[in-house]
Amino acid sequence: MTPQSVGAQGVGMQRPTHILNAASNLLGIALLIIAGLNVSHIADKSFADEIAWLAAVCLASSCLLSYLSLRHSQPGERFEDWADRIFLIGLIMLIGSIVVLAIGNR
């Protein structure tokens, strides 16, 4: 095995853990946004908390799929691919929530 192929395998093996770490951190941020909007009573006036809830559901699903990818005995590429896709959707929704909040408070 060449050093280059070992490095490529190492990067591929770390992908589910990176998705799991990033998704769990962003899930905490989404829940913090939801809590902040509810405490400040802006949730009633803005659509941002609903978008943040959808982002939280996507990010929690991504965490679950990433965890299943790590725990699967065979390479769980199917779980990993779905975790990656759902993570990206959740990230876009989280950014959308912040944009809606920023535009709505002008």
Image (cartoon, rainbow, N blue to C red):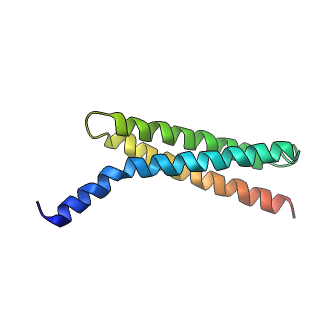
**74 relative to 46 in the view: left or right:** left
Residue found 13% across the figure and 64% down from its top = 2
Extreme-left residue of the structure: 1
Q: Position of residue 94 (x, y in %)?
A: 65, 52
Q: Which image quadrant for residue 103?
A: bottom right
Number of marks drawn: 0
**Image height of 39 relative to 106, above or below:** above
Q: Residue at x 55, y 45 (%)?
A: 24
Compared across the picture, whether 64 is left or right of 28 comes to left
- Residue drawn at (50%, 46%), measured in percent from left and top? 86
Query: Against 8, is 42 above or below?
Result: above
Q: Nearer the viewer, residue 65 or 11?
A: 11
Is residue 91 or residue 33 the one in the foreground?
33
Q: Quadrant of the N terminus?
A: bottom left
The image shows residue 28 at horizontal and vertical percentages of: 63, 46
Q: Locate residue 87, reporting x and y percent.
A: 51, 49
Could you tell me which quadrant the C terminus lies in? bottom right
